[in-house]
Amino acid sequence: MSLRDQLLKAGIATRKQVQTAERELKEERRQQQAQRLSRREEEQRQAEAARLQQLAVVEERRRQRAERQAAEEAGARRLRANQIVTHHALRFASGVQPFWHPTPGSPVLHRLDLPRKVAVELRAGRLAVVWGDVAGEPAFHVVMRAVAERVLDLLPARVLFLNREPPDPADPAEQLLEPRAER
C-alpha cells in the first residue's frame, strides 16, 4: 500500500490534498529533469566552444607556418636569383651606344652606355638586362638570354629588359644609329 492510500485511509488527508501533493511532486520532478538537461546542454556548449577555440588555434598556427614558409621561399628565390645574376653577368667596357631600360618599381628609365655589339645583341633578344642586389642596392647587369629566363622563372620582376620578338632587320626604325666618326 502506498503512502497516499495510507493517508486517505487514516483520514489525515483528503483526496484533493493528495492530488495537489502529487501534482507538486510531479512538477518538482520535471524541474529537476529540466535542470539536468540544461546542465548537460551547457556542458555540451562549453565542450563545443573549447573544441572550436582549439581548432582556431590550430588554424592560426597553420597560417603562421605557411607565412613563414612563404617568406623563407621568397628569400631563397631572391638569394638564388641574385647569385645567378651576379655569377653570370657579362663584363665589358663602357661603350658609346646609349641603351635605356626601365628601373624596378619606378617609371624612370635608366641609361646604360654599351658597346655597339652588346646593344645589338640586346635588341636582337640574345641578351637581357636584369637587376640584382649588391650590398642592398640594385645593380643593373647584362646577361645571356638563358640566364634571364632562369631568373624569370624565379623572380619575374628582376628581368628589366628581354626582347622576346627580335627586330625586323628590314625596318629602318629598328636600326641602331651608327656613332659619328671623328673628322
Image (cartoon, rainbow, N blue to C red):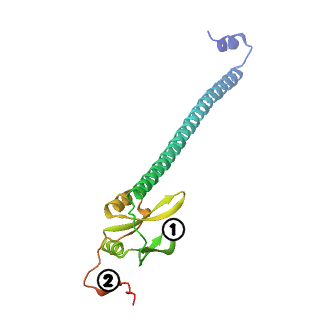
Going by the numbered disc 2, the residue's amino acid type is: Gln
Tell me the tag on residue 175: 2
Which residue is identified by label 1?
A: 105
Q: Is residue 61 above or below residue 47?
A: below
**In which quadrant of the rendered view does residue 179 lie?**
bottom left
Outermost residue to the left? 170
- Residue 164, percent across and down? 31, 70
Q: Nearer the viewer, residue 166 or 142?
A: 142
Mark 2 and mark 1: Cα distance apart in space:
29 Å
Secondary structure found at label 2 = loop
Secondary structure found at label 1 = loop
Outermost residue to the front? 183
Q: Is residue 36 above or below residue 115?
A: above
Q: Nearer the viewer, residue 50 or 101?
A: 101
Comes first in the chain, label 2 or label 1: 1
Going by the numbered disc 1, the residue's amino acid type is: Gly
Q: Nearer the viewer, residue 34 or 114?
A: 114
Outermost residue to the bottom? 183
Of badges 2 and 1, the one in the foreground is 2
Figure quadrant of the N terminus: top right
- Residue 177, percent across and down? 36, 84
Mark 1: few, some, or many residues within 10 Å (few <14, many ≥20)? Answer: few
